Image (cartoon, rainbow, N blue to C red):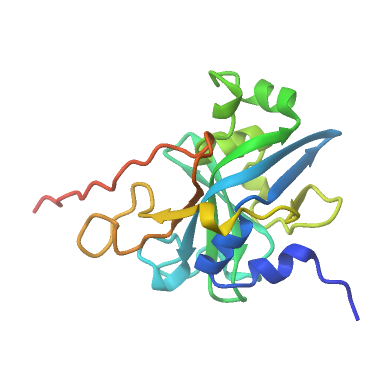
Amino acid sequence: MANVAPWREVLERPAEEAARAVLGSVLTVRDDGTEVAVRLTEVEAYSGELDPGSHAYRGRTPRTTPMFESGGRLYVYFTYGMHWCANLVCGSPGTASALLMRGGEIVRGVDAARSRRGAARSDRDLARGPARLAQALGLTGEDSGLELAVGGRAELTLDEPADPARIRTGPRVGVTGPGGDGTAYPWRFWIDGEPTVSDYRPAVRRNRRR
């Protein structure tokens, strides 16, 4: 029987379930001998074509193709014309589910993360926010679709999951939904008391001009 990567079983679960399971896990990214690892303290779940907040809501596009593949790979996208953000693809093939990595603690490779995140005021800010996290790890669009692999460029370790009693949930940052305030999708998950959890900003409903 073939060996199954330990994260594969977790990331093949539905997005909301997988989100709880990956909190406290460590994502390691390697680049030319440099290794930076982040312990995940905050993620957001996106549920594909069933979720108006998901990039895959309107179906498959060249950009979102990695989301439609099997769980256990990265989906990286460019936002606001300046930042990369990274997701862990989850669910079964065709479901287009993913977990946006919103915040974490750099546990290895702090010096390399500091060099990439020169604007960070403190170590807690190195990966506090999705764009900062991707930058600290050195992830770009070239990594979109990359499969997690033991000893590979990107690897996920699930040795110390978060205490379920410390996991909190709430609306996703800046994402609207039915009612216009995002509360219909309480799919942001974080570890209570962690200083690397990003600040919450409520969604702002924009009225279209006629």
135 relative position to 202: left or right: right
Question: In the displayed image of the protein, which residue is found farthest to the right?
Answer: 1
Q: Nearer the viewer, residue 85 or 144?
A: 85
Q: Which of 94 and 187 is in front in this view?
A: 187
Q: Where is residue 124 in the image (x, y as percent from the top left)?
A: 57, 28
Q: Could you tell me how many numbered marks the image carries?
A: 0
Residue at 57% in and 20% down: 122
197 relative position to 80: left or right: right
Q: Position of residue 92 (x, y in %)?
A: 61, 76
Residue at 69% in and 63% down: 72
Q: Is residue 62 visible?
A: no
Q: Which image quadrant: the N terminus?
A: bottom right
Q: Can residue 56 be seen in this view?
A: yes
Question: In the displayed image of the protein, which residue is found farthest to the front?
Answer: 165
189 relative position to 12: left or right: left
Q: Which image quadrant: the C terminus?
A: bottom left
Residue at 50% in and 69% down: 60
Question: In the displayed image of the protein, which residue is found farthest to the left?
Answer: 210
Q: Which of 38 and 63 is in front in this view?
A: 38
Q: In which quarter of the image is residue 149?
A: bottom right
Q: With respect to residue 161, does 105 lie above or below?
A: above
Q: Position of residue 115 (x, y in %)?
A: 68, 21
Q: Nearer the viewer, residue 6 or 147?
A: 6
Q: Where is residue 9 in the image (x, y as percent from the top left)?
A: 71, 71
Residue at 63% in and 36% down: 105
